[in-house]
Amino acid sequence: EMLITRGYSLSDVIHPTEAVYIEMRDIIKNEIDFWGVSGRVFWEGNNKPGVLSVNQVQDGELRTVASVDLDGVMTDVAGESLIWGDGETAPSSSFMPCPAGTLRSSDGSCSPCPTGTYYYEVLGECIECEVGQFNPYEGMVGEVSCISCSDGTVATEKGSSACTACEAGTISNGKEGNGAFCVDCPIGYHQPLSGAAECSRCAVGSYQSEAAQSYCASCPGSRTTRFFAATSVKDCVCTEGTYESWPIPSSDPYECLSCPEGMTCPEGGRLADWFGYSNNTGDKAYPLLQEQYYSHAYDPVFVFKCLDERDCPGGDPGSCAPKREGIACGRCERKYYYFGGKCNACSEVELTTVLFPILPALGGPLFALLVYTRLMEPLNIRFMDGPKNRALALCFFFLMHFQTLGLINQFNLVLPNLVKIPWEGFAMVNSGIQFLRPECAGGGSLSDFSSMFIMRTSMPLFLAAMFIGNYFIFKILIIWTRHLKLGDDSVFTVGMRVDYTINAFGTLMYTFSIAVLAIAFDLFKCFPHPNGLDSLRVSPDVMCYSDEWNAMIIVGVLAIMVYFVATFALFQWVCHVAPMKYGDPYFRRKWKFLLIKWKPNRWWFGQ
């Protein structure tokens, strides 16, 4: 050891050169002198090169009891023996080299290197295994005897004879801890078992906000997470088909509400994202409208259903087709009219009062006069089945058919793609004066619901006023036209007769009876919304039973009483008395529009 500390190698000590031997001799001669367990140890000197003597004081006399050569072989001196401190004489082999893996103990025996160590032949010492390694056996030789701890186990101190398993929530492997220490599972991860090598990610629907945990907490309520390894309860979001309300209720801050009808709620949907109150820095997720549904931007989940999917394209709350506005996108903007599934800009002429009301005011009396003169022919039984009446009946049935189809349009039937019916064209038959674009008149000043409803329901009254006005006008005209000799049956000579006037007006009312009755019941034709409210079919932006609706209820009731109840009662009375009064020419002329389809022997099938 003293030579090694002076720079010599172990090989130099085992196989000394002359220089090394001289150095060793000088050390032994000059520096070694101490008392050991068996007596004084010092160099007495001899003339045997390369041979050391083992001297011991026995009974007060210094004796040479053995000699050791430089190869480490000890030879007993004849007649002498080494006596140990306990008075016993050690066997001659006591100072023979101990086997590899053992060290000489204080009693002279060779003891194996303990567990947790290995025998290092270079130094002849037992060396402790490093941290992260262990050796469960005694007397092991070489560093390879120290085994690295397997994944999930550690040896935290040198000289370990075994590795201990990492606790639940911690791990160790070749990259993390490397057997020297256990590493905590990070947030978002967990490990329920002890002795594990890897942490497990928290599954979708769970999270872990603390490190070194053996479990993941489940998201509250019906919530889930968008990803694995969530680290906070804030990562828990509402599942697809549900959404988080705003403001969040304090009673249940993690409540998820079912997606309302007409909306699509993506995973993680929250109203806070729509209103801009969310601290979400990722993609915004909020309920979106489906096609044919509408909601206000300020109340996005209070959903209305649109009658036509073309009016409501879906998407963000508050979305309407171009130029559509109001609840359920139920009306066109001012100076626009609805036709062809879209809002069309009113022309310059339509925005004036020329088409409405000037044109019907001037053309109405002329139209009434034309109908009157075309229907002045008396009811003649011989010609009831003639070509003219057949043609009139055919026109009547066509108009009734078109009105029926226009009425069916209000039921929003879903037909196969192969069936294409121009519903809007047929609906024009029932729309009254809509072809004159009254909603455009006066710069759109009459486009509100109340004005349009009153105009539609009063249209038959306007037509009646045209006939009554003509009747009195011609009463005055005959005073100046009698001398013109226009003929005895000329309207300019005899004026408009009451029976013919009633027949002409009745013919128009009877022909368009379906349209008139449809208009009369418009105020009471409502359809439901997913939010529990109801809208008018003719004007979806008007809520049934609202103040705007209540303001028109008197007009609606009067229209039903006049156009349906009173008219039906009148027609029933005429049919009842017809067999008795059919011989009266005045009766036949006045009610010709009801009796024209009758045959004398089949009169009860006429209506």
Image (tube, grey):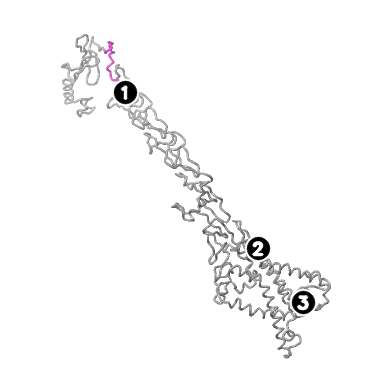
Asked whether 86 falls inside the magenta stretch, the response is: yes
Task: Specify start and end residues of the magenta stretch as a single range.
Answer: 84-101
Q: Name the mark on residue 590.
A: 3
- Badge 2 marks a residue whose secondary structure is loop
Looking at the image, residue 398 sits to the left or right of residue 236; the answer is: right
- Residue 177 against residue 250 in the figure, above or below: above
Asked whether 586 falls inside the magenta stretch, the response is: no
- Check the picture and name the quadrant holding the N terminus: top left
Residue at numbered disc 2: 525
Q: Residues within 10 Å of mark 2 (few under 14, many from 20)?
A: some
Looking at the image, residue 109 sits to the left or right of residue 408; the answer is: left
Q: Is residue 29 visible?
A: yes
Give, as a three-letter code, the residue at label 1.
Ala
Looking at the image, residue 442 sits to the left or right of residue 480; the answer is: left
Looking at the image, residue 289 sits to the left or right of residue 26; the answer is: right
Pick whichever of labels 1 and 3 is earlier in the sequence.
1
Pick whichever of labels 1 and 2 is earlier in the sequence.
1
